[in-house]
Amino acid sequence: MATPVTRYAKSGGVHIAYQVFGGGSIDLVFAPGFISHIENYWDHPELARWLLRLGSFARVVIFDKRGTGLSDPVPEIPSLEQRMDDVRAVMDAVGIESAAQLGISEGGALMALFAATYPERCQRLVLYGAFARWPITADALKPYLKYVDRDWGTGRSLPIWAPSRRDDPTLQQWWGRFERLGASPSAAMAVLQMASQIDITEILSSVHVPTLIIHCTEDTLIDVECGRFLAQHIPGARLIELPGEDHLFFVHEKIGDCIEEFLTGSIAIAESHRVLATVLFTDIVGSTARAEEMGDQRWHNVLDAHHTTVRRELARYRGNEIRSLGDGFLATFDGPARAVRCACAISEAVRPFDIQVRCGLHTGEVETAGDDVQGIAVHIASRVSALAEGGEILVSRTVKDLVAGSGLHFKERGKHSLKGLQEPMELYAASH
């Protein structure tokens, strides 16, 4: 097969390189791990055969994540939320409303979060060599960071990724070129920094699509316990443990067989009324007292200006207004970083009205009921908001963990007991 044509999807202001190949009846979106270069993929016969194996039963969409390969370089470390936007942009560019999702290694966390947030766009989920929380300690990572800084592009890191192929000079030569084309040393370090902050543990129970987890029992890079943890915490997930120590996916031919068997059965469409969302509550501090001070007419004018401002910021950050609460709002977002930035923008924008708002946010599973949302995540966000001080944006630990790499800043606000929760919850004050 001729090398597929590389095209670009626009995700905000970033161009994401992607290719489409294969003629199967199933659409499969492939998120790579660490780094990638979709054109260089086809220069290695073993990898090309592995990809064509997928293309024998699926129409496959592969892409380079922002900051890697043929996609645009980016000045800041990309967050999982931004990369979710990239997945959506590629799917929209191809014209795919819903597809199976395949995430390799670090790309597994991305696809699991995508499946929880957009279940209507994910039919099935396959994770290989993946993890919920970055499993490599800072000390263990230091030698590899030293390699990136001094020897990147030589291919001498191959034994880390594929120990069984350490004496394969042809693969090492290709691997060195793959490193050089996949990312610059600085970009590679940025990707590692982002990956080291990944922790999607809290949202695994919100993945409600059929899920297959594949992991090698002797994986020397990402321990098999990471795969077992995913299988234990994603409802109904199936785990296949393959023999071998190599983390590098395409050296395992059997992975293709496992994926085909999983995807070519009957495809279950996920229930779209249960989704992962970030819930935002806003509230004007001391509204009753302020109304008495201002008088009815002036207070109504302030409320009108407040409501207009909040709705403007919700539209700007793609928030979904659920309802107005008199002197506050309930809204949901499909990305936690946007939700936090929206809350910060609201807090700043209403100051000229001589009022302060408190904001509370939590990311969790919600159930949609018409134009309303329900569920424990809504109650948690409400209670977090009630604990915020005037002008403060207070978020749960889940929100903080999910926006790692977004450039947002947080200060610890300690553990708090929230009604309905058995364990105290860590809260953080957010700022730009």
Image: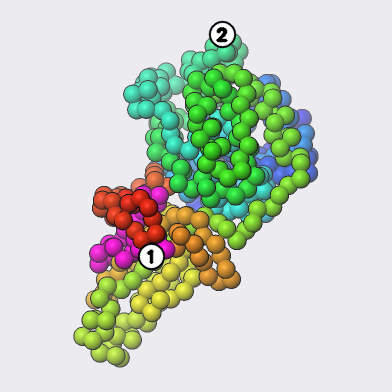
The residue singled out by tag 2 in the image is: 167
Q: Is residue 185 visible?
A: yes
Residue situated in front as seen by the camera: 232 or 39: 232
Position of the N terminus, as image quadrant, is top right
Residue situated in front as seen by the camera: 409 or 239: 239
Question: Is residue 399 located in the magenta-colored stretch of the structure?
Answer: yes
Q: Is residue 7 visible?
A: no
Give the mark, 1 or 2, whose residue is nearer the N terminus: 2
Q: Is residue 14 left or right of residue 268?
A: left
Q: Which residues are magenta?
A: 379-400
> Amino acid under label 2?
Asp
User: In the figure, 391 relative to 176: above or below?
Assistant: below
Q: Residue at x 39, y 46 (%)?
A: 401
Position of the C terminus, as image quadrant, is bottom left
Nearer to us: label 1 or label 2 = 1
Residue 167 placement: quadrant = top right
Image location of residue 76, percent across then percent down: 39, 43
Q: Residue at x 23, y 81 (%)?
A: 289
Image location of residue 303, percent across then percent down: 34, 81
Q: Is residue 73 left or right of residue 417?
A: right
Q: Residue at x 31, y 60 (%)?
A: 393
